[in-house]
Amino acid sequence: MSKLIEVSNVSKAFGGVIANNDISISVPEGKITGLIGPNGSGKTTLFNSIVGYHLIDSGSIKFKGAEISKKKVQQIARLGMLRTFQQTRIYSLMNCVDNMLISVPHRNAAFFDMFKPYPAELLEKAEDLLEFVGLYEKRKLRAGDLSFGQQKLLEFAMALMNEPEVLLLDEPTAGINPTLINGLIDRLKRANTEFGITLFVIEHNMRVIMNMADTIYCLAHGELLAEGAPSEIQNDQRVIDAYLGAH
Amino acid sequence: MLDNLNLLVIAPYLGVQLLLDGIFIGAIFALAAYGLALVWGVMNVKNLSQGEFVIMGGYFAWYMSTYGIHPMYALPVAVIGMFGFGWVVYKTIISRVVEKDMFTSLLATFGLAIVIQQGLNLAFGPEVQVAESGFPTHTIPIWGGEITVAAIRFYSFLICCVLAGGVVAFMKKSRMGQAIRATSQDVRAAKVMGIDTEKVFAFTYALNAAICGAAGVLISMIWVIQPFYGITHSIRSFVIVTAAGFGNLAGVLMASLGLGVVEQYGGFILGAELQQATVVGMLLLVLIWRQVQMNRVRQAVQ
Amino acid sequence: MTAVTDDNATEAGTGRRRLMSRNDSFIFAGLVLFGILGPILFPNYTFQIAVLWLMVLFALTWDIMGGQMGYNSLGNIFFFGAGMYICAVVQVGLFTDVGAYTSVSGQGDFRFTPDQYYIGVAVGLVAAAIGSSLLAVALGWIVFGLRGPYFAIGTLGMALAAGELVGAWGWVGGGSGIPMPVYPGSGDGKSYFFYVLCFVAAIATFMFLKWLYSTRFGLAINAIRDDEDKAQAMGIHTLRHKTVAWAVSAFFLGIAGGLFGNMTGFIEPLEVAFPTVTFGIFMVAMALLGGKGTIWGPVLGAILFHFVKEATWTYFLGWQWVTLGAIIILNIIYFQQGIVGWLQEKYPGWFGIEVDARAPAKAPSKGPAQ
């Protein structure tokens, strides 16, 4: 089982606030890895560091064995590591199908590829994936006119369209109608098993993450508090204390 | 160009002269730039008619001087007049674009700038005007040469300081000033706390116009005004605010004096016809510098 | 899963499968017909109609960046002026010394033969197009780290600076400008010659953009408009697309500049080549009036704007520029989505846009909040 993402001793501070302090984690290939922690514990900062949104102060981040901590967002995305946003981001004035089409992988895009039309297979694939997340009926609607939950699903479908090797999901179930959460968990798992995409998930909903993840890391106050299988994390006194604020 | 550089070396007192002139002019730039920073910071409106407000203020002074009234008396008139004008502009135009995206406000104020320019042109003609203050000019011997300091420049510098101090005190002490500062931090929170943000916006915009008007009166006495000179003043304000960031009065002041000095030197070394180009060149330089700065933290300048 | 047999679905689904719908073709044919018949029916207005085509070109090229990509440039006129000067320098420089020519304002002994004239125009226009594009690529490196207001102000500064610098550059005539080579023929012949070139340039721009927006490029720049950070996070080569978009604008604007310089016969930096507050702001106003981010909007806006301007200008007696500013303000405040944008909201079906019947579409004209 090889490690797809390897974060070692990463620290990141904003001004005087230490958001991440000496964090080391690894995401094994083909698995679902969870990242939990109370608000402000540095989860999203860690995500941003991994995908190159900002530079880290120290430490190293490797993707498939190669150092990526100096690379830029686009370069990292083209390597096959993609993230979704906590505040869902889609192209609001374009319709769903166009949102999907523009999300095709750009890793091998040559300069003149930008002047090519989209082949029919891609359109078919886009529609298949929209069907997969349950948005086929809405495919011609402007993405900005979808509900928040639907936009989240669209963003997920766009990420799948990009055929990443690893997908970093920032709170995929936040803001989603509770009755739809089970369906979403199911789809996330299928993305992992059927499409072979490694998942690294930030999640607040304990039921979701315990149900999904193979390994879970817990952050608190910018430090790595615990790691282990869901059952271990669930019973870890330090994790419970962190969440209840007993410090 | 090289001749002029050479001249600066042979006659160092010229450098002192340029430095002084730059500081006198820069102090006035600071007023308009502070106004822009205020409007930008509080209501996120990038006012491209900033320079036209300055020129309008200048025409108050010039017009009064044609009736034999000393242009200094135009100061309160211009401040009050421009305050009213700003209020009207806010109510008719700005209030409708303040919620929209940035390009809307930028373009609306650009449209306003064209209207003001052309209106002034129709009213007063395209000639370059000066409001004569009639104050004496002193010469001070220094380093084998002598520099000239017009008394009016010195007075205008003092007035700038007083005005700036007044505005700062107003922002700190008065209820409206506090409301403006609160709104600039978070419009929604201010609204929830019962601040009439609409009124705050109108007041801020009018205050900006008034400050610009005062700056214009000073400009008309120590420099020149012309209906189409406004855009350069707008660009100056943008250069200063971009370099200093808004909500940073000391930064605005330093950047303004710096720009004034650079412009004087640029005009002297490159020739007077390139003085405007120096301003625009400074804009591009500041923007590039900001990009490099932001690029280091992987952000775009927005 | 649905197989893509339903051709219509693909059409409307992306709106990009086919280059032109039937309605589009009719309007387009009408436009071309007007272009051909215009100077025949109204020979006195040949120059005005030629300028109309340039206006169409202005609005279309501004819209590549401003409408489709969300980068509102206030300084695109820079490429117009750059093209004008490149064309002039090439036209003169091919056959005589530019510095000597400009120093006597073209009043020297040198005269262009007809062959030299036509070769000069042809080579000059090509050079103008390519030169302007290269300038766009080079400047793109400088300004593409700017967004929103900074981009608008930065590009405005660029155009203003260009005017000032060219005005101080003696080799190209400085502030007193360059008299262009004289057309070897009658005045009518000249206006028809340049009319045809302007018409072809505008139509070529339209066709090219129509095609360009149907490729992946079109979707990519739309994505940059809607959310550039997201586009980066998805791995889109944003800088590459932005540079190409600007270079395309510059290419056609360069040609327009070369043509306009020859049409007026005399070029100088502030009023003719880099008129930031006239042509420079017209292109923005026209695209907004017609509806930015659409292919027909800029065309419609340019035609309407030019007709109204030409028809009413003389009646304003000096107030025309004040009126212009007022029109821009009113347009911005009350009619920001433009004519085509308004039609799209009202009759989305015409444009192949589907709206959720249950939830009335929220006003989509606002664009991404900045």
Image (spheres, rainbow, N blue to C red):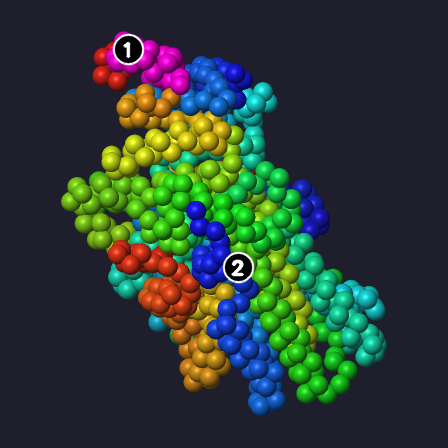
Q: Split into 4 quadrants, where in the image is the C terminus of chain A? A: top left
Residue under the point 41% across and 38% down = A156
In the depicted view, which residue is nearer to us: A79 or C120? A79
Query: Of the numbered discs in the image, which one, if any, rests on residue C17?
Result: 2
Magenta region, residue range: A214-241
Q: Can residue C186 be seen by looking at this rendering?
A: yes
From this view, report whether residue C155 is shown above or below residue A222: below
Q: Quadrant of residue C188?
A: bottom right
Are the residues at dot 1 and dot 2 in contact (C-beta closer than 8 Å)?
Answer: no
Residue under the point 42% across and 63% down = C352
Query: Which type of secondary structure does the marked residue at label 1 adopt?
Result: loop
Task: Please count the marks in the image.
Answer: 2
> What residue would you read off at disc 1?
A235
Question: Disc 2 sits on a residue from what chain?
Answer: C
Q: Are there few (<14), some (14-19), or many (20+) residues within 10 Å of tag 2?
A: some
Hey, which residue is sitting farthest top in the picture?
Answer: A237
* Callout 1 amino acid: Asn
